[in-house]
Image (cartoon, rainbow, N blue to C red):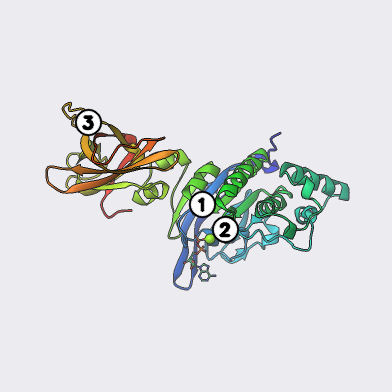
């Protein structure tokens, strides 16, 4: 069953952040940030440590006072400079990194904590429903200290979901879990949020986690919203080098723009919008390099030959370290990522082609 939140009908954004700025002394933690989240959406705020993600979440929750800009939740203005609705009046569910469960309350009591109004019977029913959906029914009478990390995380999430808030905020909710468990908990969390139609703003510094969880991702840097889009659009159409590199390692080349293109060892790349003579940086994802045997056929203009320096199987992919030996003498060290097991021996010469959809050209020095 898919629950649609009641406010859906109003057509208002679940969250509307406009021109939000927040400083701590001289540090601009949040800088002119805008974002609109529609009902039922899971949006991830993704950025490096210290870029202002937690500050932004705290502003939305009402734990920091707004200095500049505005925040509206489900169509209600909750914060503008000089007017801040207190956190308890914002109807926002919160899940922090450390879960912050009440140690002296059972799982059921924790989950029921935010349920105010309604009869006892209604309250009990809602607790039972949420416990069931979170797979926590058998732990209802336990205390938090008798739960594993993953179970505690589920209780924190269930507690946030129980009052059906128009918005829940998650701050690095999986960072306290070890890798294998984290994958399971993430998966459960995604399905729980989606089944409840729960609008969510989640903070993470992990691009893969953001892509796993999010309908859309807002990439944040130094307090600013750099690019907001669907994960696949961010991956294939990054706005700049910073966004490109946030989603994978890249091979970096240099070039100069002539007549709208830059020359690379793998042929020309479109440099749309860059003026003639511009110094360009070329970013190529490792999976964009297509390897095949160098069989002595004449080289096409858009392929190069490269020598294998090393090859390592990394699990789902193999990483091949290559060296191009260009006429000019300066060698290019490249990483190619190939699905599955591909382990050519050292010194093998391979033909290297390029998937242009995963090669990006930006002006040098701009990111
Ligand atoms: N209460 C505070 N007092 C002073 N500086 C702070 C405070 N909270 C955060 N900052 C600073 O604001 C910037 C953004 O921090 P934060 O929002 O925690 O980033 P993130 O969650 O992305 O790691 C950092 O430079 C941090 O040191
Ligand atoms: Mg943080």
* 1 and 2 marks in contact (CB < 8 Å): yes
* 1 and 3 marks in contact (CB < 8 Å): no
Question: What is the residue that sits farthest to the left in this orientation?
Answer: 328
For marks 1 and 2, give the CA distance: 9 Å
Quadrant containing the N terminus in the rendered view: top right
* Ligand 1 closer than 8 Å to label 2 CB: yes
- Reading the image, the residue beneath label 3 is 294
For marks 1 and 3, give the CA distance: 44 Å
Residue 78 visible in the displayed image: yes
* Ligand 1 closer than 8 Å to label 1 CB: no
* Number of residue marks: 3
Question: What is the residue that sits farthest to the bottom in this orientation?
Answer: 25
- Reading the image, the residue beneath label 1 is 45
Residue 13 visible in the displayed image: no
- Kindly identify which numbered label has been placed on residue 128: none
* Ligand 1 closer than 8 Å to label 3 CB: no
- Reading the image, the residue beneath label 2 is 57
- Where is residue 180? Give x, y as percent: 57, 47
* 3 and 2 marks in contact (CB < 8 Å): no
- Residue at 41 percent across and 39 percent down: it is 317
């Amino acid at each position: 069953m898919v629950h649609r939140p009641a406010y859906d009908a109003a057509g208002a954004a679940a969250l509307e952040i406009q021109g939000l700025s927040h400083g701590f002394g001289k540090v601009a933690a949040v800088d002119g940030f805008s974002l609109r989240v529609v009902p039922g959406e899971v949006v991830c705020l993704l950025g490096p440590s210290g870029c202002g993600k937690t500050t932004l979440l705290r502003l939305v929750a009402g734990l920091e006072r707004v200095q500049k800009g505005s925040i509206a939740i489900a169509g209600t203005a909750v914060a503008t400079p000089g007017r801040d609705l207190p956190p308890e009046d914002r109807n926002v569910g919160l899940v922090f990194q450390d879960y912050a469960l009440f140690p002296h309350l059972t799982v059921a009591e924790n989950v029921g904590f935010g349920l105010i109004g309604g009869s006892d019977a209604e309250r009990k029913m809602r607790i039972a429903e949420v416990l069931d959906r979170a797979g926590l029914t058998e732990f209802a009478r336990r205390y938090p200290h008798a739960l594993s990390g993953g179970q505690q995380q589920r209780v924190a999430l269930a507690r946030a979901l129980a009052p059906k808030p128009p918005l829940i905020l998650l701050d690095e909710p999986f960072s306290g879990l070890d890798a294998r468990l984290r994958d399971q908990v993430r998966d459960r969390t995604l399905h729980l949020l989606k089944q409840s139609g729960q609008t969510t703003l989640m903070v993470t510094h992990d691009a893969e986690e953001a892509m796993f969880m999010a309908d859309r991702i807002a990439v944040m840097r130094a307090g600013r919203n750099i690019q907001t889009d669907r994960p696949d659009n961010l991956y294939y159409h990054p706005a700049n080098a910073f966004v490109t590199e946030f989603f994978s390692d890249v091979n970096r080349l240099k070039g100069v723009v002539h007549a709208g293109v830059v020359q690379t060892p793998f042929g020309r790349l479109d440099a749309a919008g860059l003026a003639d003579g511009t110094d360009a940086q070329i970013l190529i994802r490792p999976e964009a390099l297509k390897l095949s045997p160098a069989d002595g056929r004449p080289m096409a203009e858009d392929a190069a030959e490269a020598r294998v320096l090393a090859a390592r199987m990394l699990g789902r992919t193999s990483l091949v370290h290559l060296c191009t030996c260009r006429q000019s003498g300066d060698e290019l060290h490249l990483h190619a990522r190939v699905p599955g097991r591909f382990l050519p021996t050292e010194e093998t010469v391979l033909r290297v082609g390029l998937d242009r959809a995963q090669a990006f050209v930006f002006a040098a020095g701009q990111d």
